[in-house]
Amino acid sequence: MSDSFAARPLDRGAPFYVAGHRGLVGSSVWRKLESAGFSRLLGQTSAELDLRDREAVFDFFAREKPTNVILAAAKVGGIAANSTFLVDFLSENLRIQVNVLDAALAHGVERLLFLGSSCIYPKLAPQPIKEEYLLTGHLEPTNDAYAIAKIAGILHVQAARRQHGRSWISAMPTNLYGPGDNFSPRGSHVLPALVRRYDEAQSSAVPLVVNWGSGNPRREFLHVDDLASACLHLLDNYDGASHVNVGTGEDHTIREIASMVADEVGYTGETRWDTSKPDGTMQKLLDVSMIRELGWRPTIGLREGIASTVSWYRDNIGAVRT
Ligand code: GDP
């Protein structure tokens, strides 16, 4: 893991494929790349290109010949979905990433960024979690299937560097939120779930909200537009074997997050906690010194980010994924 070099900024005119450009992360990356002057962005909806279909993925790469790729396509979900649909999370994510990474290798992609997740780290990792803690202990069981797929992706990228000299890199974001998120009660992560639950309680004057778990776990939240800026920063400035954590370096209890969301939507009723629902890991705060040393830090504060997510949700309530 010692080959860490400065990179050359990407050519803004080269074809750039954003895999998963309609998702929370991919759509934000797309907006960021457009505003940074990339003129040949490539995106395919899942109806146009099923990334689980290996032949279709190879045909796409042969036809479009992207120079650069961000792999933001994945099957994702919150604690309930992850711990229920284990086979789907493992199998779909492995297939998507193996197809895209193999096709990228076969068709000469120069720079590629693979996106993972902070759940790749051991459940009981020391906090804050450094990149080197990967594979030093057992995973959190509520998301181990998803985590194993993501760990395979990190290794795949490192293998392409070692075996074929590719300048490919990986980034591990902490819990993400923002516009375009999944607000469906059973599939969503905690922040969009709370936005929806408190907003519905406030608008229909329900006096009691019940959230999952004890409220005591701590989570670090990053606005997805900050992640998109980190992705471009890494591609322009970093070419090393180690994956790079992307976060804020600060965390809060779920109880504190719930109270911020309640304040933002104007909910004044009671909140209770359903401890029959899983807490998941108690803390997963990333050590962000590596990306800070590379010259990047987030710019969107949590309260500001929650406020803009609430207003996005209210404006798009009819169109959000249910
Ligand atoms: P995690 O970070 O992988 O555990 O994923 P989540 O974002 O789904 O959950 C984070 C924490 O929020 C867990 O401790 C959940 O129990 C808690 N939580 C509280 N209410 C909810 C909810 O309505 N939905 C989800 N997904 N999590 C909730």
Image: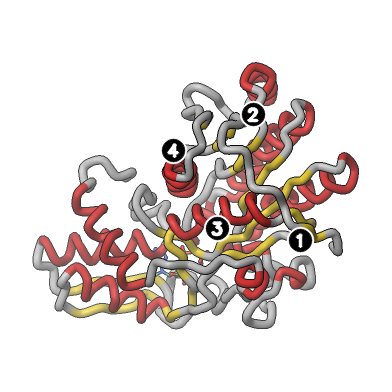
User: Which disc, if any, is residue 66?
Assistant: 2
Q: Is residue 247 visible?
A: yes
Helix, strand or loop under label 1: loop
Real-space Cα separation, disc 2 to disc 3, in angstroms: 21 Å
Q: Nearer the viewer, mark 3 or mark 1?
A: 3
The first of marks 2 and 3 along the sequence is 2
Real-space Cα separation, disc 3 to disc 1, in angstroms: 15 Å
Q: Which colouring convention does the figure follow?
A: secondary structure
Helix, strand or loop under label 4: loop
What is the x, y in percent for residue 259? Answer: 28, 78
Q: Nearer the viewer, residue 85 or 36?
A: 36
Answer few, some or many: residues within 10 Å of disc 1's Cα (few below 14, many 20 plus, some between 14 and 19).
many
Real-space Cα separation, disc 3 to disc 4, in angstroms: 19 Å
Answer few, some or many: residues within 10 Å of disc 4's Cα (few below 14, many 20 plus, some between 14 and 19).
some
Helix, strand or loop under label 3: helix
Q: Nearer the viewer, mark 4 or mark 2?
A: 2
- For the residue marked with disc 1, what is the amino acid? Ser
- For the residue marked with disc 2, what is the amino acid? Pro
- For the residue marked with disc 4, what is the amino acid? Arg
- Residue carrying label 4: 22
Real-space Cα separation, disc 4 to disc 2, in angstroms: 18 Å
What is the x, y in percent for residue 41? Answer: 51, 31
